[in-house]
Image (spheres, rainbow, N blue to C red):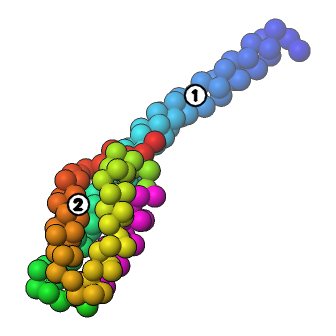
Amino acid sequence: MTSRTKILVVAAVSALLGSFLLGFVPQYRRVKQLEAELSAGSSRIQSLESEAKFARLRDLASALFLETVNQNYGTASGRASELFNHVRSVVSDPAASEYRSTLDGILALRDSVIGNLAKSDSSAQKQVQDILERALRIKGPLKPAG
């Protein structure tokens, strides 16, 4: 190969490499930007899901309280079961770790509340009021786990 041919080959390879980099760098930056946007969106979704869980907890506690105040103990018993099942699922959420003691306190009342509702005992109202107050102390939004 002559030196002129070598120069042309080097120039061609350099031009090819340069063209590749001119196309690659902007695409690489765009991919990184989209990954950052996706991560932010995922964090927001996780935060909203946690907020929804606690909103549901407050709704269930409020409904249980209303049924108990109205002395609808049968309906209140069903609401109580639904509430305690939901609390159990919320406790397992890593984003709820900040509220674990409050949630455990609600769960500790489970057997007593369900027993008193089954007996149509009016003392259940005080316990249910305590559950509602604890549920209302939990404020959103939660911090995403991770």
Q: How many marks?
A: 2
Q: Residue 116's x, y, as percent? A: 27, 80
Q: Main secondary structure of the magenta part?
A: helix
Identify the residue position indicated by label 1 in the image.
21
> Which residue is outermost to the right?
1
Q: Give me the C-alpha separation between circle 2 and circle 1.
A: 57 Å
Residue 135: assigned label: 2
128 up-or-down from 99: above or below: below
Q: Which residues are magenta?
A: 76-92
On the question of residue 53 being in view, the answer is no
Disc 2 marks a residue whose amino acid type is Ala
Left or right, 130 with respect to 33, comes to left
The quarter holding residue 62 reads bottom left
The residue depicted at 23 percent of the width and 53 percent of the height is 138
Q: Any magenta on residue 84?
A: yes
Residue in front for this viewpoint, 76 or 82 = 76
On the question of residue 145 being in view, the answer is yes
Q: Residue 112's x, y, as percent? A: 32, 73
Left or right, 71 with respect to 13, comes to left
The residue depicted at 18 percent of the width and 76 percent of the height is 123
The residue depicted at 24 percent of the width and 73 percent of the height is 60
Q: Secondary structure at mark 1?
A: helix
Q: Is the residue under label 1 in contact with that under label 2 (CB below 8 Å)?
A: no
Residue in front for this viewpoint, 115 or 142 = 115
Q: Dot 1: within a 10 Å radius of its alpha carbon, few (fewer than 14), some, or many (20 or more) residues?
A: few
The quarter holding residue 59 reads bottom left
